[in-house]
Image (cartoon, rainbow, N blue to C red):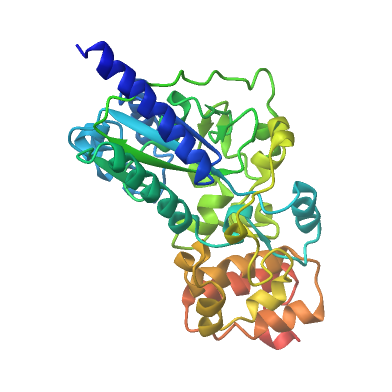
Amino acid sequence: MQSPLQDAQLAQLTQKIKAWAHTLGLSAIGITDTDLGRAEARLEAWLGEGFHGEMAYMEKHGTMRSRPSQLESGTTRIISARLDYLPEAVAQSEQILADPQLAFVARYALGRDYHKVLRKRLQRLVELIRGEVNDAACRVFVDSAPVMEKPLAQKAGLGWIGKHTNLLARDGGSWFFLGEIYTDLPLICDLPAADHCGDCTACIGCCPTQAIIAPYRLDARRCISYLTIELHGAIPEGFRRAMGNRIFGCDDCIQVCPWNRFAKLTRELDFLPRARLDSSTLIALFEWDEATFLKRTEGSAIRRLGHERWLRNIAVALGNAPGSGEIINALQMRLQHKSLLVREHVLWALQRHGAGNPGSQ
């Protein structure tokens, strides 16, 4: 058992860490222990249903994901951090979704890749911690290893996992990124956050592909974020029309959540839209060649998609847009693309416009 002095020092260090986090621009921070027994059981059941689809990394590491000390030996506490990212009012997102000629990109991907931004802040926080305890074991994670970031954040008091399976905070909705520091310092833990979804089912009812099959249960294989980002092959035809003009991710279940009326616009310039991705037409983005795609998505989370799947997604959105000669011409320009994946989706889009035969124009 620790002496009173040691307890007092730990309490003081815990408060210092929270103050430093605020100074570094983090939106919120909490601390929890490593017990994820309940979350582990839910994860195993979810994987057993096959709801993860092609995301093999979700099961690759076994219990390392749900048992932090297996990932980083000696870990006794997790510092969970939140960084708000909403770049513009939700009404602007809704306007883009309502215009089928515009391209919708999930708000988190409009600016700089958050992994680098948040990791840099957390590394700086580690430096400050080691300035107080120079032999402290600390390791930073920002979606970079098998970490159950949402259950950890809930236990750390940052929010609760809503019926859409995203983390929700009473003062910030869901428009934020999460990152963690695994440490061997026995810091003072925060109380877990309580669930405040109540009887609301807005997120379930609004999902375009009915991916939220029950409260707190998501079949990722149906989710537009999965279909446009994680899926490497052809998008199943049964989901293409429901995608609308969403070419990278989907924010519908977040946008409709009543708690997001409390969300704050980000103060991070790095998260503001780049390359006009918040206002571009589908045709303009479909015209990007690979070199342009790589240049315009430099430092962006979108780059991991690759040019081929970028065109695949936009082809589907063009198929869902109102027909016009301009759209048909743009699609026909890609009919001879070297990628069979691209050609398949282009042909589907042309058929949607009654122009499946290239010679019909």
State left or right for residue 47 relative to residue 225: left
State left or right for residue 261 relative to residue 182: right
Q: Is residue 55 at all visible to an observer of this figure?
A: no
Question: Can you say whether 357 is above or below 85 in the image?
Answer: below
Pick the front one: 104 or 345? 104
Pick the front one: 95 or 345? 95
Quick one: quadrant of the N terminus?
Answer: top left
Q: Position of residue 349 (x, y in %)?
A: 67, 70
State left or right for residue 64 relative to residue 155: left
Q: Position of residue 157 (x, y in %)?
A: 49, 25
Q: Is residue 353 at all visible to an observer of this figure?
A: yes
Q: Position of residue 144 (x, y in %)?
A: 35, 51
Question: Can you say whether 97 is above or below 252 in the image?
Answer: below
Q: Residue at x 26, y 27 (%)?
A: 76
Quick one: quadrant of the C terminus?
Answer: bottom right
Q: Position of residue 13 (x, y in %)?
A: 36, 29
Pick the front one: 278 or 244? 278
Pick the front one: 121 or 309? 121
Q: Residue at x 38, y 40 (%)?
A: 180
